[in-house]
Image (spheres, rainbow, N blue to C red):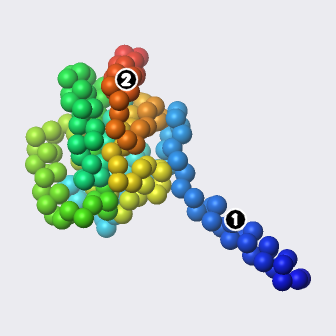
Amino acid sequence: MTHKHKLIFWTMIVLFVASSLVKADLELNQVPPLTQLAGDVGGRLDGTSWNSSELQGVVHILMYVDPDKIRVNEHVEEALAKEQYPSEKIRSVAITNLAATWKPKFLITKILKRKQKKYPGTTYVTDKSKVLVERWGLLDHSYNVLVFGPNGNLLFNQGRALSGVEVANLIALIWLQISN
């Protein structure tokens, strides 16, 4: 085998291996890859694990947030709060991407525990290792808004500030899902 052929061969091997390591971005109407946050990589504030298989049974709104970007979609949170969705048909999950910030983790956790007391209907979770960035392709250093249907299928995914029209579409989508 000539040097050129060896170079091509090893380049193809490297590209093949690299392509198998690429993260899988979420697809609309599909159930995301099962993912667990537990132990050193994160979990609920009480120390128990969180698993994406929990995103079934009712409509779920999931916010995946860099603590440095909490204000980016504050208008979305306010708009959703005004809707007063029936609690038996919808759940909310707030996952904080702790690996995306320079802020002290203990301080963020303390703030999240206060929020958990104020909003007991929301499940608060931490991601200490960017697991959802890697496994689901969510945007890092951002504020991601996702909605999952009762079957766990992804219905909405946006990783930046939502426009007024997008917020209206999001609200309409949620009402449509919980009306069925």
Q: Amino acid at mark 2?
A: Val
Q: Which residue is mark 1?
A: 16
Q: Position of residue 12 (x, y in %)?
A: 75, 68
Q: Residue at x 63, y 65 (%)?
A: 18
Q: Position of residue 83 (x, y in %)?
A: 23, 21
Instruction: Name above or below for residue 21 compared with residue 24.
Output: below
Q: Residue at x 27, y 32 (%)?
A: 76
Q: Quadrant of residue 71?
A: top left
Report how far apart the C-alphas of labels 1 and 2 lie in the structure.
Answer: 41 Å
Q: Which residue is mark 2?
A: 165
Q: Quadrant of residue 14?
A: bottom right
Instruction: Name above or below for residue 53 compared with residue 18.
Output: above
Q: Amino acid at mark 1?
A: Phe
Q: Residues within 10 Å of mark 1 (few under 14, many from 20)?
A: few
Mark 2: which secondary structure? helix
Q: On the picture, is 151 further left or further right than 1?
A: left
Instruction: Name above or below for residue 70 compared with residue 178.
Output: below
Q: Residue at x 16, y 39 (%)?
A: 120
Q: On the picture, is 45 further left or further right than 149?
A: left
Q: On the picture, is 54 further left or further right than 27?
A: left
Instruction: Name above or below for residue 121 compared with residue 14.
Output: above
Q: Nearer the viewer, residue 162 or 131?
A: 162
